Image (cartoon, rainbow, N blue to C red):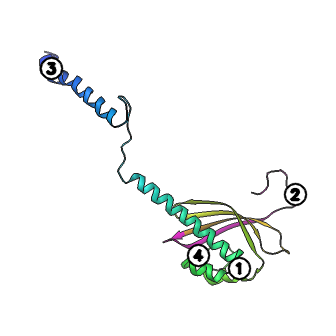
Amino acid sequence: MGTRFSLRRYGVLFATLPLTIALTTAISASAGTGAGQLEERRPATAGRDFDHNRTRLEQHKRTVVAFYTLAFNGHQPEEAVRRYVGPVYIQHNPFAADGPAAFIAFVNAFPQASVEIKRVIAERDLVITHSRVQLGPQYPAQAAMDMFRMKHGKIVEHWDVVQDIPATSANDNGMF
């Protein structure tokens, strides 16, 4: 014998179904969503975590901009290192040694250097700047992309890619 559907067996379910739909609709309406709409459920801290991460990224960006501005434009690399560099400074530029002292020596070797930061991007523990660099009047202006790794709010690692800005270009887009 096959299984037969029994209205009596499921009668309670069908009798309460309209009540369940009515209650769900009322609760959804009072919560600001209409019937049939799905509301995203997030933990109460989700918005705060996002705001905290955004705030941390903005702080990382401010740190890197302040570091380069003070070192190159303010001509105070020692103070920039003291304020913004961590206990370790790993350098990936093949022409520069590791450590804060090597950075200070580089900046001091170009007393007329200046950096004009055009863009700053941050993600996780990395900050990237896109800049116009002028080491001095006798040197060509350069376009530079610098990447910094942050740890505990301090700069601990640096990569860069630098190229001279040519006098002429195959397009009208410019370097920045």
Q: Residue at x 57, y 76 (%)?
A: 84
Q: Earlier in the sequence, mark 2 or mark 1?
A: 1
Q: Which residue is mark 1?
A: 75
Looking at the picture, how far across and down is residue 167, in whole percent?
A: 87, 61
Which residue appears farthest toward the front when viewing the image?
A: 30
Frontmost residue, 116 versus 91:
116
Q: Is residue 139 left or right of residue 24?
A: right
Q: Amino acid at mark 2?
A: Thr
Query: Which structural element holds mark 2?
Result: loop
- Residue 25 picture location, percent across and down: 30, 29
- Residues marked 2 and 1 touching at CB (< 8 Å): no
Name the residue type under label 3.
Gly
Residues shaded magenta: 150-176
Lower sequence index among marks 3 and 2: 3
Question: Does residue 6 appear in this view?
Answer: no
How far is mark 3 from mark 4, CA to CA? Answer: 73 Å
Which comes sooner in the sequence, label 1 or label 4?
1
Q: Nearer the viewer, mark 1 or mark 3?
A: 1
The residue carrying mark 4 is 90
Q: CA distance from mark 2 to mark 4?
A: 35 Å
Residue 111 image position (x, y, % from top left) = 76, 81
Neighbours of disc 4 within 10 Å: few (<14), some (14-19), many (20+): some
Q: SS at mark 3?
A: helix
Q: Mark 2 — residue?
A: 168
* Labels 2 and 4: the sequence-earlier one: 4
What residue sits right under mark 3 in the picture? 11
Alpha carbons under labels 2 and 1: distance apart: 31 Å
Element assignment for label 4: strand
